[in-house]
Amino acid sequence: MDIEQFMQGYKQAWEERDELQFCALFAADGEYHNTPFAVQRGHAELAAYWQRVKLQEDVRVRYEILATTPTGGIAHWHVTYQVASEELFRIWAQSTGTNLVARKPGDPLPRMVLDGVLKTEFEGDLCRRCELWWHSLPEPA
């Protein structure tokens, strides 16, 4: 696997909101560091973490390869999605350490923008380790 193949699979797994496609990118004991302070190891933890993408709708992923090596690479990624549940909105607010965006009862849930960089390490045809650094905010009106 190389960074381009990984990013194509990552994009497809996210846009299709499919934890099995996501897990298929990783070695059985692969690591996904969704922040510098959190890690999911192995397919069971990866699949459990990826369940949150099922709370997103109209997901659009773009990426650009920044660097490639024989055993890894770095990519910049940009994602937009429609928040599909109050639960996801609370998860987002807690993970970013921010307060909830001021909303009145009945106000629509926001469309979110995420922008980040990831670094991968491959072992054969699978990802051994993926580290992310990212930020998110509601899409400006």
Image: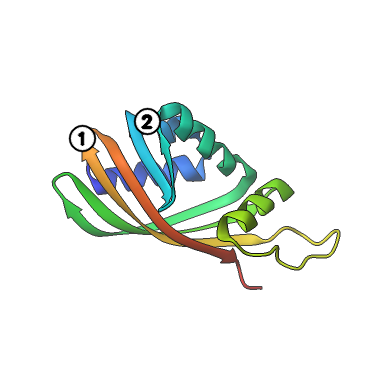
Q: Is residue 120 above or below residue 116?
A: above
Name the one closer to the observer, 8 or 69: 69
Q: Secondary structure at mark 1?
A: strand
- Residue at image point 63% right, 64% down: 98
The answer, for residue 27, to whether it is visible in the render is: no
**Image quadrant containing the N terminus:** top left
Percent position of residue 90, x then y: 68, 52
Toward the left, the furthest residue is 70
- Answer whether residue 38 is visible to the viewer in this image: yes
Mark 1 vs mark 2, foreground winner is: 1
**Percent of width and height locating residue 112:** 59, 60
Q: Quarter of the image for the C terminus: give it.
A: bottom right
Q: Which mark is residue 123?
A: 1
Residue at 23% from the left image edge and 52% from the top image edge? 73
Secondary structure beneath dot 2 equals helix
Q: From the top left corner, tell me how far across and down residue 128 is, in percent.
A: 28, 37
Q: Quadrant of residue 134?
A: bottom left
Relative side of 75 to 44, left or right: left
Q: Residues within 10 Å of mark 2 (few under 14, many from 20)?
A: some
